[in-house]
Amino acid sequence: MRIVLVGPPGAGKGTQAAYLAKNLAIPHISTGDLFRANISQGTPLGQKAQEYMRAGQLVPDEVTIGMAKDRMHQPDAENGFLLDGFPRNLAQAEALDEILKADGLKLDAVLDLEVPEDEVVKRIAGRRICRKDSSHVFHAIYNQPAAEGVCDTCGGELYQREDDSEETVRKRLEVYHSETEPIIDYYKAQGLVVTISALGKVAEVTQRAMDALPARD
C-alpha cells in the first residue's frame, strides 16, 4: 500500500506514521529522515541540500524530490510506503505522480489528519522540552510535570522552544494553508483523500485511520 500522510503541524503525523507503517508493514518515509540520511552519508543530493541549508535558504523541490525518489526505489519500499512530509506542495505532488507512473504504480490513499486550528496552537504552544534530554517532553495542559518547570524523569529544566511559541505556530499554519493544503484538493480530484479526525488518544486515531484506509489486496 502506498500512502501519503497530510495534516497541519501538531496533528500528530510523525506519531501516527510510525504506528501505521508498523501495522501495514511498510516503511515510514519522512522528509526529516531523508535529509538527515543523505547529509550524514554525504550523497550528492545531501551535499546540495546542506549547501542551501548553510546559506539559510530553502532546499529546492528538485533536491527533495530526488531524495524521495531514491528512497522509494529501495528494496524495503517495493511493496509500499507511507510518505510523511512529502509531497509538501503541488509541484512535489505532481512529481510524485510522475515517479509512480514511470514505475507503473499509483497511490492507494492520501490520509488527511484533521485538527481544529485552535487545538493545533494549544498542542504545540503548550509543549515543554527538557534541557538535559529533549526526548523528555511534557505539556502545560495534557502532560503536566509534578513540579512546574522541572522534568519528572531527570530533574532538568523544562522550557518552551522558540519554534513552539503561539506566534510561530500561527505562521507555520499560514505556510501550511498556502503551500500544503492545495495538494488535498489535488488528490481529492483523484478520489484518493481519506479524512479522519486526529482528536483523541493516539491508539484511537490509529484505529480510525486503519478503518478508513482502503482494503489491501
Image (tube, grey):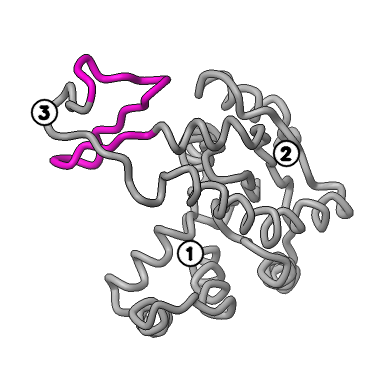
Check disc 1: other Cα within 10 Å, few if <14, some if 14-19, many if 20+. few
Quickly name the residue at label 3: 154
> Which region of the structure is painted magenta?
127-148
* Image spot of residue 167 (x, y percent): 50, 48
Mark 2 or 3, closer to the camera = 3
- Three-letter code, disc 2: Asp
Q: Is residue 145 magenta?
A: yes
Residue ID at (22%, 34%): 158
Residue ID at (18%, 27%): 151
- Three-letter code, disc 1: Gln
Mark 2 or 1, closer to the camera = 1
Quickly name the residue at label 1: 74
Query: Which numbered disc, 2 or 1, marks the residue that appears first in the sequence?
Result: 1
Instruction: Tell me the distance, in whole angstroms, between the alpha carbons under discs 2 and 1.
Output: 22 Å
Quickly name the residue at label 2: 217
* Image spot of residue 125 (x, y percent): 44, 37
- Three-letter code, disc 3: Cys
* Image spot of residue 138 (x, y percent): 31, 28
Query: Which numbered disc, 2 or 3, marks the residue that appears first in the sequence?
Result: 3
